[in-house]
Image: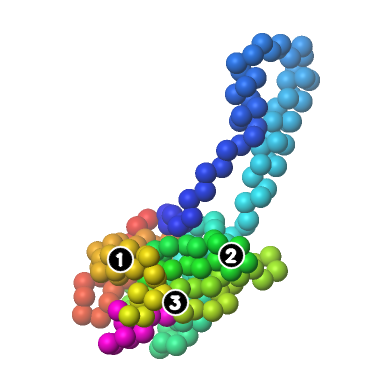
Amino acid sequence: MKKGFFAVLLVSGLIATLGLSACGKTEAPSSDTSSEAAVEATEEQASEGTETEPEVDGSAYGYAGTDPIECAVYKYMVEEVGKNYDAADVSIPVVQVVHVDYTNPDEVLVSGDFWINNYNIEGDTLTCVSGGNHPGVMHVTKSGDDYVVSSFDTVSDGADFESSAQELFGDNYEAFMEVYGNADAREELRTITVSDYVNLNGLEVTQYQDFGWDPVELYK
């Protein structure tokens, strides 16, 4: 259900080739054997065209997308940030990306407003017991076949919040503030991510709840 934050437009060389052939004169296969061979060749080319897409399993973090860099951000929020709060049954982040800087391919910078929430499973409800907000810039680097967050620059609290946010986000500061101030969009993304976590992990859970608030129904 959750969409990745990196939209990639893939133009298949196979489709382009077939499109050009359709405009020219072609001869029909002379036998069933030729037809089967053509189908096999087409399937093989199509398979080769998709092999470059890395396999990503973000189920442990509530990530249902396919981008390894984004998955690294989710993993970091769960395994590194989540452990700083009261422990619970599950830890699920809310990742709101503001900007991604690919200038240095060896160190991708992911700027955003990042939240973590820890939940206990109580019947059909995920009850939130701890969590917090960590806006800033993550440095994502390649480690073997995987991507990892090597460092995380966070916005300061209190009186230094604005100045530190301006320094970290630079030209994207206004975009960050729009994301940071939109509680409705954040809660919608939270509902989507928690739903993804529940569905990916096969939990018998239908809702989540913050202390003192009505429960929020999850998506199927």
* Quarter in which the N terminus is drawn: bottom left
Q: Earlier in the sequence, mark 2 or mark 3?
A: 3
Q: Is residue 190 above or below residue 133?
A: above
Residue type pointed to by label 1: Glu
Name the residue located 49 percent from the left edge and 59 percent from the top edge.
64
Q: Earlier in the sequence, mark 1 or mark 2?
A: 2
Q: Position of residue 51 (x, y in %)?
A: 67, 48
Q: Badge 2: few (under 14), some or many (20 or more) residues near its Cα, within 10 Å?
A: few
Write the start and end of the magenta stretch as one range. Answer: 154-162
* Quarter in which the C terminus is drawn: bottom left
Q: Nearer the viewer, residue 16 or 161?
A: 161
Residue 174, numbered circle: 1
Residue type pointed to by label 2: Asn
Residue 104, numbered circle: 2
Q: Position of residue 16 (x, y in %)?
A: 61, 29
Tags 3 and 1 touching, CB below 8 Å: no
